[in-house]
Image: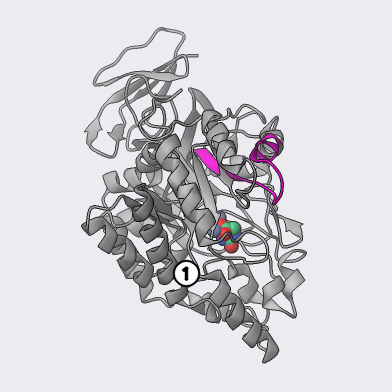
């Protein structure tokens, strides 16, 4: 069915203008004033709202094994929750198990998404092992549209790889055009500090943050960028949390180095004080890297404003408090690392960013949709309101008020990191490839309708 969105204000990364949007065959066909549609077209009146490109969350972990359990949202519940919040594409992470081929992981993650995903999804590959055919596997993945790889400098006993492996992977991207995403924390040093804390009987959730110093993040960001410079390729730092780490990125970018970084709403809005909540409450805020002292928050907002940070993603990795976080009741090292947020990203960044005057409306669109599309090989099919782009469109009501709560959210997790936060501005209607999947709080999308996004490598055309 064709759709005409009338009387709205179209907001992209570059402009804000009164215009109608015509959607035909799942794609945007026209944007402009006074558009007409056939008598059989659905007409949506967008008066008083913003018409923005669907959000793109470039960092999610659905149905992911971690710490002896699985993240509690799968591709159905997670993508449905994402859609409620105005996100129409995600890039999730497949994990290569040590000693296995990346294709096995890709097949496993495709199966997880098949029949469940309600919005479009791409996949990054977490590389744990480049021995044997690892480098050829990377090329193979790029051909399959997995054009980005995540490597860990943390978690020495499970996911961490050494600098030689990181350098080999970076160097390979000079040939295959992929992008390396770095989890930048000095895991070896952190493990020593963690062991000391546990030996001293310091096992409460707050020690998760106290054993992971800011300098361990900044050092790893510095090293990531240095290794990328030696290899002569770009690098993308995931979930950046602190002023010190941000300074490393800014300094590199000032020198013209293609270093990119994302942060997440939790680092902009929560702090180490949340980990110090009484009893075991702090476990709800155990994720990695950890929350920092409040003083870092304005620096991160400033980084977003001035393009030292390019993207806001969620690192959505939910674990239920009652039966999963509890695994670490007597030892913070056993708390599954991760927090929920896939549903709330646009709401939080709009309210605390745009309404609070920290970023413009156009910058909001840029950091939540257009830039992730560009960096991760989806632009201009995604992240844009223009003829030819997929009709992933959100009708954003700037007046809608809403209180975030586990009682009303759609994520399959028994708490909200943002419980009681009041926000103004919310997705009213969410359209994915021309289909209305959320309308006025009602979910209309079918499980399995989401399509795999075969993403382009750097310099490559969208397929
Ligand atoms: O604590 C986190 N962030 N869990 C997900 C895995 C990761 O490092 O992104
Ligand atoms: Zn990470
Ligand atoms: Zn993550």
Q: Which residue is mark 1?
A: 270
**Residue 382 x %, y %:** 41, 31
341 is within the stretch colored magenta: no
**In this view of the protein, which residue sits in the foreground, 351 or 117?**
117
Q: Position of residue 209 (x, y in %)?
A: 54, 77
Image region (quadrant) for ligand 3: bottom right
Query: Element at badge 1?
Result: loop
Q: Is residue 439 left or right of residue 279?
A: left
Residue 268 placement (x, y as % from top left): 41, 64
Is the residue marked by circle 1 packed among few (<14), some (14-19), or many (20+) residues within 10 Å?
some
Residue 61 seen in the figure:
yes
Q: Residue 256 appears at what percent x and percent y?
A: 23, 52
Q: Quadrant of residue 384?
A: top left
The segment highlighted magenta reads 88-107
From this view, report whether residue 18 is shown above or below residue 318.
above
The residue located at (34%, 29%) in the rendering is 385
Residue 321 quadrant: bottom right
Q: State the residue in front, 355 or 242.
A: 242
Q: Residue furthest front?
A: 132
Task: Find out whether residue 97 is within the magenta segment.
Answer: yes
177 relative position to 119: left or right: left
Q: Quadrant of residue 160?
A: bottom right
Query: Can residue 350 be seen in the rendering of this structure?
Result: no
On screen, 97 above or below 441?
below
Left or right of 48? Residue 178 is right
Horizontal arrangement in the rendering, residue 111 relative to residue 9 (left or right): right
Residue beneath the point at 26% across and 50% down = 360
Residue located at (36% from left, 54% from top): 230
């Amino acid at each position: 069915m064709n759709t005409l969105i009338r009387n709205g204000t179209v907001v992209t990364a570059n402009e804000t203008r009164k215009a109608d949007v015509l959607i035909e065959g799942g794609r945007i066909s026209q944007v402009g004033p006074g558009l007409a549609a056939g008598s059989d077209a659905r007409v949506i009146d967008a008066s008083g709202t913003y018409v923005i490109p669907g959000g793109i969350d470039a960092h999610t972990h659905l149905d992911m094994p971690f710490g002896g359990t699985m993240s509690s949202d799968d591709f159905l519940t997670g993508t449905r929750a994402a859609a409620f919040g105005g996100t129409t594409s995600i890039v999730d992470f497949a994990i290569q198990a040590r000693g296995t081929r990346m294709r096995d992981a890709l097949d496993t993650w495709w199966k997880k998404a098949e029949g469940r995903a309600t919005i479009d999804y791409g996949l990054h590959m977490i590389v744990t092992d480049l021995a044997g055919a690892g480098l050829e596997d990377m090329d193979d993945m790029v051909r399959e549209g997995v054009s980005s790889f995540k490597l860990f400098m943390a978690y020495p006993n499970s996911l961490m790889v050494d600098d030689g492996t990181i350098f080999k992977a970076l160097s390979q991207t000079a040939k295959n055009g992929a992008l390396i995403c770095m989890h930048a924390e000095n895991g070896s040093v952190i493990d020593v500090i963690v062991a000391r804390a546990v030996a001293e009987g310091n096992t409460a959730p707050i020690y998760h943050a106290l054993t992971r110093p800011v300098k361990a993040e900044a050092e790893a960001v510095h090293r990531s960028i240095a290794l990328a410079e030696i290899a002569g390729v770009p690098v993308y730092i995931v979930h950046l949390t602190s002023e010190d780490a941000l300074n490393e990125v800014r300094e590199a970018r000032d020198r013209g180095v293609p270093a990119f970084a994302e942060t997440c709403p939790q680092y902009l809005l929560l702090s180490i004080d949340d980990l110090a909540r009484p009893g075991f409450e702090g476990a709800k805020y155990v994720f990695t890297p950890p929350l920092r002292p409040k003083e870092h928050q304005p620096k991160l907002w400033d980084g977003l404003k001035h393009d030292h940070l390019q993207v806001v993603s969620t690192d959505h990795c939910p674990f239920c408090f009652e039966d999963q976080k509890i695994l670490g009741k007597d030892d913070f090292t056993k708390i599954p690392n991760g927090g929920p947020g896939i549903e709330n990203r646009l709401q939080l960044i709009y309210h605390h960013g745009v309404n609070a005057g920290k970023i413009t409306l156009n910058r909001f669109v840029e950091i939540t949709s257009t830039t992730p599309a560009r960096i991760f090989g989806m632009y201009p099919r995604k992240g844009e309101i223009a003829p030819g782009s997929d009709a992933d469109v959100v009708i954003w009501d700037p007046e809608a008020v809403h209180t975030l709560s586990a009682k009303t959210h759609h994520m399959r997790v028994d708490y909200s990191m943002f419980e009681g936060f009041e926000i103004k501005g919310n997705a009213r209607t969410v359209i994915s490839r021309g289909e209305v999947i959320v309308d006025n709080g009602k979910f209309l999308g079918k499980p399995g309708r989401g399509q795999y996004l075969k993403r382009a490598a750097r310099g490559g055309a969208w397929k």
